[in-house]
Image (spheres, grey):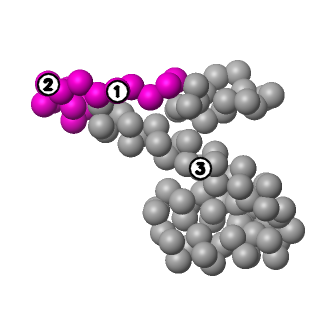
Amino acid sequence: MMTLSYRDRELVALGAALAANCIPCIEYHVPEARKAGLRDLEIGEAIELADKIKRVPAGKVLEVAAALLGMPVAKADETKRDCNAGSAQATKSCC
């Protein structure tokens, strides 16, 4: 059963590829996203959002590791950690 459109599937694939740090996946799915009708601006926005979401847990892991070692760690600007920053629909952050 496939209820997602080709376009939607490529957006999901881009997010997953970025989260997995998979260069071959990004190289494959950017052209596929274009074939699916996504503009480069939309692809870029999807990649930027996926990166913002990916950075939140990575930053939290760094904070825990630093705390366990008693080392200071520079906290990221909270607005940069908000994956919904700038969204008109955002009422709170998912991260």
Asked if one can make out residue 5 in the rendered structure from this viewpoint, the answer is no
* Disc 2 secondary structure class: loop
Residue bearing mark 3: 50
Closer to the eye: label 1 or 3: 1
Q: Which mark is residue 70?
A: 2
Q: Residue at x 61, y 35 (%)?
A: 83
Q: Quadrant of the N terminus?
A: bottom right
* Disc 3 secondary structure class: helix
In the rendered structure, which amino acid carries the disc numbered 1? Ala
Asked if one can make out residue 41 in the rendered structure from this viewpoint, the answer is yes
Give the answer, above or below, for where 59 lies relative to 23. above
Give, as a single range, the part of the protein colored magenta. 64-78
In the rendered structure, which amino acid carries the disc numbered 2? Gly
The tag earlier along the polypeptide, 1 or 3, is 3
The tag earlier along the polypeptide, 3 or 2, is 3
Q: CA distance from mark 2 to mark 1?
A: 13 Å
Label 2 crowding class (10 Å Cα cut-off): few <14, some 14-19, many 20+? few
Q: Residue at x 14, y 24 (%)?
A: 70
Give the answer, above or below, for where 23 lies relative to 87. below
Give the answer, above or below, for where 70 lies relative to 14. above
Rendering quarter of residue 6: bottom right
Q: Residue at x 51, y 71 (%)?
A: 23
Relative image position of residue 43 (x, y in whole percent): 74, 59
From the viewer's side, name the closer residue of 66 and 90: 66
* Disc 1 secondary structure class: loop
In the rendered structure, which amino acid carries the disc numbered 3? Ala
Residue bearing mark 1: 74
Q: Which mark is residue 58?
A: none
Quick one: which residue is furthest to the right in this view?
Answer: 37
